[in-house]
Image (spheres, grey):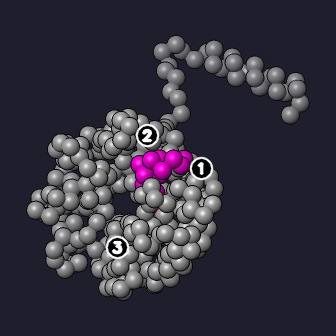
Amino acid sequence: MRADRREFLLAAGACALARLPRSVPWFPASRAKLGPIGIQLYTVRRELARDPEATLARVAEIGFQEVEFAGYPPGAPQAVRAMLDRHHLRAPSSHISLQAMRNDWDRTLEAAATVGQRYVVVAFVGVNERKTLSDWKRLAAEFNRAGQAARKHGLRFCYHNHDVEFPLLEGEVPYDVLLAETDPGLVGFEMDLYWITKGGKDPLAYFAKWPRRFPMVHVKDMDSTPQKSFADVGTGTIDFRPIFAKAKLAGIQHYFYEQDETPGDVFASAKASYHYLRSLSF
């Protein structure tokens, strides 16, 4: 652009702003907010075991629109789906055991599809499964096979982290090994924002290095004590705004609030956390 034309446009813009009445407010660019907010039902596992129907009703009353199971309530998958429908809830995901993946995979996938899920997630691997780097590579190969079978059912296989995946093992980070050794078309990752932080890693660095690999996140907060215990979301030390601002880069589709242990009323903590997340902009 020629200098005289640029100066003319700048001057014209300045004049136009000068003519605006003082009563016209200046609005900053709109900020993003979260879509549907879910809850990992492990948070209310004791209540769910006592009374599944009442627990789902309380969760829906708070405002949660999605739930993630960590084991289904008693009954056939069709009955679980009907219970969700009664409370206008969706269950896009469920945690399953490594043993279910190995020994009962077809039935697990069929149940997940009936309940209405899109994802099945291995939530944890025991210490005897992860002693060496070769163990992690073997798990990655198993996850690829599980992901291939899941895709035939219209589902996506994912892995959920704790903090055991982040200390160096034989000079490498096991979580990085899983990401590198799994097929992005077959295996996704549900990032637990508390555990990755406790493991000393930065979620943003993983989003940048491994874009669109993280369709789900667990949103849980960490208190400021030396023990780094769980906290109601919004009262702890984790800054969620910059993490959520990179949701598109990460590939995040679902946000599940979780609190592994709650010293007081679990529903009060869930409600406080929900309202914080609902009000959050980034």
In percent of width and height, residue 15 lies at 69, 17
**For the residue carrying disc 2, how many other residues have a C-alpha within 10 Å: few (<14), some (14-19), or many (20+)?**
some
Note whether 168 is above or below 107 in the view shown. above
How much space separates mark 2 and mark 1, taking CA atoms?
Answer: 15 Å
Q: Which residue is mark 1?
A: 205
Note whether 36 is above or below 115 in the view shown. above
Note whether 139 is above or below 16 in the view shown. below
Nearer to the camera, 241 or 11: 241
Kindly identify the residue that appears in the image at 10 percent across and 62 percent down. 50
Kindly identify the residue that appears in the image at 31 percent across and 41 percent down. 231
Q: Which residue is mark 2?
A: 238
- Can residue 60 be seen here? no
Q: Which mark is residue 97?
A: 3
- Image check: 75 left or right of 223? left
SS label for mark 3: loop
In percent of width and height, residue 17 lies at 63, 19
Mark found first going from the N terminus, 3 or 2 = 3
- Image check: 65 left or right of 192? left
Q: Nearer the viewer, mark 1 or mark 3?
A: 3
In percent of width and height, residue 214 lies at 50, 60
Mark found first going from the N terminus, 2 or 1 = 1
